[in-house]
Image (spheres, rainbow, N blue to C red):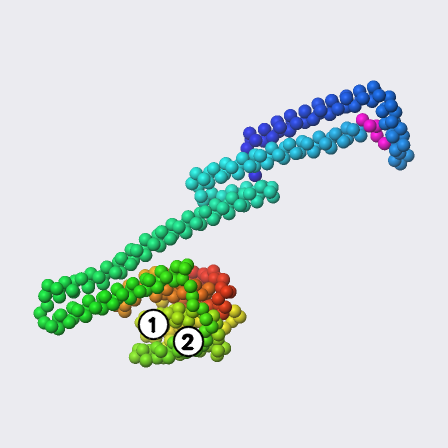
């Protein structure tokens, strides 16, 4: 840390004053000591005898005056150093306080950057950590507020659209604005479909909020994951065959056991398989594969359908995000399915991401075998940079 010119001159002045005072004190002690020796011949004689008895290398030791001066020089240097270092630390503390006042005035991006002595450096590091923590908390709070506003806006928009259609068609029926019984049935059916769409949205929204809530607990039990994937593949065989797709599952080893909430994980894979069936255009197969590696299970839900755009990969798990807005609404998607899947996977201590190229689109899930040992989430590169 650099001192200001004023502080440097103040430190020099402090040193000069201290040296002068110490020299005056030393002179006073020498005068007093000489007075004592001259006024007390017995003491002077004792000092002389001690001097005569202490011989080093055939030579007498210094006179008592030289010995006294050497001791006083050591004491003076110690006092001078202590005074100057204490004043220097005081200036350092004043700089820290000035930096704190600057940060408290609203400059939360500012950090104390100068290096200090070990003791004060711990103070500086603690202050910087505290500011970082406070800033992060404020950013998280603002992000939560924005997230809440976005959620309300998106829910309002997605509910308003089918609700407008329901009110419109029921209004036609209420006002008898239909020509035939067929028209009446058509209007009622459309209103029913829109109401079903609203119900699906509300249920997904409730599930999403429930999974994001800290109070929601998993019903953990030992799950035969290999059998679970096999049953999921079998349950979608008929629907896949109607779309001219084959669906299969395989695991390594053949019998993977893990701790999980089977119902919640089933929701994840039902969502991923349904998405592959709905949006995997020109696909010929869907594969469910799992591999046990150490204390984690890596699962892939893959299909050879149309490639997901690179720009969309990082946004797939955002609430209400749809790769193609119009097509997703036609197929009844709420845009919450993948967000719910991500929340369930993270609640299990794992993580999920997507990869896609012209040959294969895969949703990859890493899950811990034991729930008390969550997996550290790796820092993944932006696909835009690696594509």
Residue 280 visible within the image: no
In the rendered view, does 9 fall on the left or right side of 79?
A: left
Q: Residue 371: x, y in percent? A: 48, 66
Q: Which residues are magenta?
A: 61-65
Q: How many marks?
A: 2
Which residue is at a point 77% across and 23% down the rendered structure image?
Answer: 30
Looking at the image, residue 265 lies above or below residue 16: below
- Mark carried by residue 329: none
- Mark carried by residue 229: 2
Quarter in which the C terminus is drawn: bottom left
Which residue is at a point 18% across and 62% down the rendered structure image?
Answer: 167
Our reading of the magenta stretch's main secondary structure is loop
Which of the 4 quarters of the picture holds residue 74? top right
Residue 63 in the magenta stretch? The answer is yes
Distance (Cα) linking label 1 and label 2: 14 Å
In the rendered view, does 202 fall on the left or right side of 347?
A: left
Q: Residue 80: x, y in percent? A: 67, 31
**SS assignment at label 2:** helix
**SS assignment at label 1:** helix
Disc 1 or 2, which lies upstream in sequence? 2
Q: Residue 295: x, y in percent? A: 52, 69
Instruction: Name the residue carrying label 1.
Output: 274
In the rendered view, does 119 fall on the left or right side of 141?
A: right
- How dense is the environment of label 1, judged by Cα within 10 Å: few (below 14), some, or many (20 and up)? some
Quarter in which the N terminus is drawn: top right
In the rendered view, does 95 fall on the left or right side of 212?
A: right
Nearer the observer, 303 or 139: 139
Residue 180 in the magenta stretch? The answer is no
């Amino acid at each position: 840390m650099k001192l200001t010119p004023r502080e440097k001159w103040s430190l020099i002045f402090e040193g000069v004053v201290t040296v002068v005072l110490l020299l005056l004190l030393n002179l006073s002690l020498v005068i007093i000591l000489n007075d004592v020796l001259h006024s007390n011949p017995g003491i002077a004689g004792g000092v002389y005898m001690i001097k005569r008895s202490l011989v080093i290398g055939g030579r007498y030791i210094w006179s008592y005056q030289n010995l006294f001066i050497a001791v006083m020089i050591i004491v003076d240097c110690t006092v001078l150093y202590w005074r100057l270092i204490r004043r220097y630390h005081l200036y350092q503390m004043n700089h820290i306080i000035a930096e704190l006042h600057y940060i408290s005035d609203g400059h939360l991006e500012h950090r104390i950057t100068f290096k200090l002595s070990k003791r004060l450096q711990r103070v500086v590091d603690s202050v910087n950590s505290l500011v970082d923590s406070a800033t992060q908390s404020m950013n998280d709070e603002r992000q939560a507020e924005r997230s809440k506003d976005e959620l309300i806006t998106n829910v309002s928009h997605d509910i308003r659209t089918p609700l407008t259609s329901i009110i419109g068609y029921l209004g036609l029926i209420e006002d008898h604005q239909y020509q035939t019984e067929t028209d009446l049935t058509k209007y009622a059916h459309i209103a029913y479909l829109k109401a079903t769409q609203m119900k699906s949205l509300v249920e997904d929204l409730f599930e999403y909020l429930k999974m994001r809530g800290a109070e929601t607990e998993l019903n953990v039990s030992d799950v035969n994951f290999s059998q679970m994937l096999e049953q999921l593949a079998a349950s979608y065989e008929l629907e896949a065959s109607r779309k001219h797709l084959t669906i299969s599952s395989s695991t390594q080893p053949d019998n993977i056991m893990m701790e999980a909430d089977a119902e919640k994980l089933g929701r994840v894979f039902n969502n991923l398989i349904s998405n592959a069936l709905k949006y995997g255009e020109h696909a010929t197969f869907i594969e469910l594969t799992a591999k046990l590696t150490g204390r984690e299970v890596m699962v892939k839900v893959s299909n050879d359908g149309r490639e997901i755009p690179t720009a969309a990969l990082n946004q797939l798990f955002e609430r209400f995000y749809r790769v193609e807005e119009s097509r997703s609404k036609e197929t009844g998607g709420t845009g919450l399915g993948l967000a719910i899947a991500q929340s369930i996977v993270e609640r299990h201590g794992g993580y999920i991401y997507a990869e896609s190229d012209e040959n294969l689109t895969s949703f990859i899930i890493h899950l811990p075998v034991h729930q008390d040992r969550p997996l550290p989430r790796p820092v993944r590169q932006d696909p835009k940079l690696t594509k």
